[in-house]
Amino acid sequence: MTFVFRWLLRVATGLIVLGALVVGLMWFFLARSLPDYDATARVSGITAPVEVVRDMADVPHIFAQNDPDAYFALGYAHAQDRLWQMIVARRTVQGTLSELFGARTYESDALLRRLDLYGAAHDSLAAQDPYAMAALEAYADGVNAWLAQVNRGALGRGAPEMWLFNHAIAPWQPADSLAILKLMALQMEAQIPAEVLRAQTSLLLPPDRVADILPDDPGPALATLPRYAEIVRDVPTSFALNDTPRDPLAAVPLPGFQGASNAFAAGPARVASGGTLLANDPHTQLTAPSLWYLARLKLASGDVIGATIPGMPIILSGRSNALGWGITASYLDDLDVYIEEVNPANVAQYRTPDGWKAFETRDSIIQIKNAPAVTLRLQWTDNGPVLPPDQFDLGTIRPQGHVTTIAWSALSRTDASMSAALRVMRAKTVTSAIDAAEGFVAPAINLTLADRVDIGMKSLGAFPIRDPQHDSQGRMPSYGYLPQNRWQGFKPYAENPQFIDPAFGIIGTTNNKIVDAPFPDHMSFVWGDTQRIGRWEHLMQQRQVHTRQSFIETQLDTVSPTARSLLPLVAADLWFTGEAAADGTPERLRQRALALLSAWNGEMNEHLPEPLIYAAWMRALQDRLIRDDLGPLADRFTHVDPVFIERVFRNTDGAGAWCDIIQSAPIEDCDTIARLSLDDALVWITDHYGNAIETLRWGDAHTATSDHPVLGDVPLLGWIVNIRQSSSGGDNTLMRGLTLGTGNDPFLNVHAAAYRGVYDFSDPDNSVYVISTGQSGHPLSPHYDDLGERWRRGEYIPMSLDPQIARASAVGVTHLFPLDLPPSADIARP
């Protein structure tokens, strides 16, 4: 027995030692890819010494003697900290993810090959001005300089993920940066799912009920559209939806998760200090690392600081000492879906206004890891690329013998958006920035601006010109061969909506409707917000003058105007009805829930139970209202539409009819549906969290999920690479935390303000900013998640252009020298 015990002890000890060695070796090799910020390097691509000072938050402050060298250093810093993120983004837009990840990313690759965004980006190089080309080339040289150092120094393949997905890294090209800007446009595009969903709904419901469930934003009424079946004939009214789960690496977000944001500015008369203020918080998918990366550049036109996206040499939201700028999704209708008739006698042709015409075709080969390659036949019409029926559920809204195409401004092959963005960075005033932005095509954004005196906003993007006789006004797919449905060019930039120094001294947008022109002079029928704007307006008008702190409080506001308006309406006849019920009964649980909600002020605070009860109730209520009418299509309505709920409970245009369950014999009223749906919600809550509803925490359900898109689902590794935190806010709060809306955890916070910035021009160095994770994309770095907890608590870090502040708390200083300059040469200093 002693002999066996000794051998077991030896084996166990050996296994422990072996395990420790394996872990130690893994740590050693993975840690090799952590960059040394206190380093000196001689590199090819710069003309003078450059200094990169990393402040306490790992934000690079780049001091160069000329602009190309500054962009070089930005590319170098991006590659040091976010190389894997850049590689994945480039592969996404190129349609080559499957070379690394196998069949799971085939659909994404196929879509991007059909759109050919990378080809459009490559062709658009010729449209860039000389300054932009120099910046793009210098930025690419900086990325490639770091790749060369990784290869020379065996620096852990540049990123820890490369040990699992090792593949040769092609040199960075200027076209790669243009392509990532186009990928951003794709991820912000809301029109395709909106057109398809409206068409699907129109096939099942009469126009007045479509107007309920897909309501227009409040404002002047629009003429009712005909049913989709009257616009496009012979479309089956029964269809199967594509319910394949979305892969985290998919290029296109789920419907409802396109770009959103807040941006607002106040002029001197409305600011206590007499300067101007600007706040911006773009809402994007939460990931680890964050989409955003903070940086400061010393340029000849003046230093700039703010939020970048790795892969591009531009500060998308930020400031100089003279000007601040912020971006929000504008929801411009810059895309139309077309139904194209295929020639039954020759499938290589499609119908045009002038007769049959041959598709433009090309083959493209997708290499798939551990699977045979697939050859795609790509097709284009005059309107745009042909998309497959399984993408965006397009197969459900097209008749036999037809294909679907899209016309989209981002497919432009002469897109000078990068040049325009770089000009805005160098502008000094609101008006010069607006002039500088001419030529910006996509993504469609609202640019909010503030200099030391003025504030303004300009919508950027190419506005299509549509015929007043367009069959669907661009709201649903239409026949592509009819002349009235085709685009007739683009409006002049001067006609894009613009606001400068409004009389009331404050300007802003929460993705709400900003103009109310009728079709075809409209901007969009689909907007990203009908609720946050009311709360923002209240907070702006409740003070005569604002401060940096009041702007911060507005960004972090968690009061739900939706809860405040819907609960009194939905629960009007439930608050004080019913007899006292015994403990443990559903009636008693309902009374306890109503008692909590009756005293609640609508604040979606992570520590409170009421937000979870409210959110679960409204979710169950909408599902009960629409499930019997829409069947499986109800699953596409993943988030509560407060305008729809209000229409139903106010019986607007007969919308109260939704409360009757058409499959049942009795005629149900809205009070009954409200009560039953509350019971549904409480059953769901008790199943997941128990029946002690007074101790519920919204934050337990509303967890901010900054997950790694590749490794986040891997056991153990997910625990290391995912950043998850309890969070406040909700779908309709200014501090937006858009919920997942589906699955077992429908209230996870998956889409939020991953960047926040407040720019104060009475004292520019008093400006602040923060991102949702950390600067580094390396899970072993102390800067992988160090800003995440500040972000969760609503804290910020200084956004100063004072070089001494950056140096005083530097975690490292990198010196870059040209190859032909000795290291003893003077270092570039401000």
Image (cartoon, grey):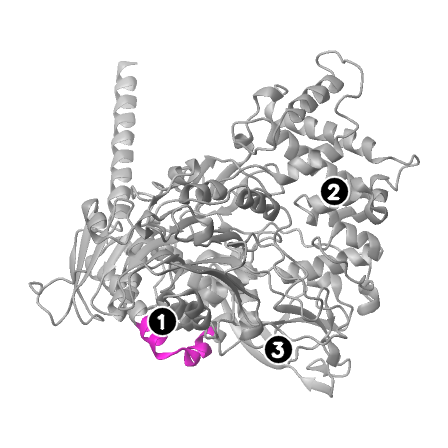
Which residue is identified by label 1? 173
Mark 1 or 2, nearer chain start = 1
Distance of label 1 from label 3 (alpha carbons): 26 Å
Tag shown at residue 727: none
Judge whether residue 123 is colored magenta: yes
Residue 713 visible in the shown view: no
Instruction: Using the rendered view, name the quadrant where residue 11 is placed.
Output: top left
Find residue 324 and report its horizontal and vertical position in percent.
Answer: 40, 58
**Secondary structure of residue under mark 2:** helix
Q: Which region shows up in magenta?
A: 121-137
Q: Nearer the viewer, residue 524 or 182?
A: 524
Quadrant occupied by the C terminus = bottom left
**Residue 28 shown left or right of residue 590 in the figure:** left
Q: Secondary structure at mark 3?
A: strand
Q: Main secondary structure of the magenta part?
A: helix
> Residue 380 bears which disc, if any?
3
Q: Earlier in the sequence, mark 2 or mark 3?
A: 3
Q: Amino acid at mark 2?
A: Ile
Compared to 609, does 200 lie above or below?
below
Could you tell me if residue 755 is visible in this image?
yes
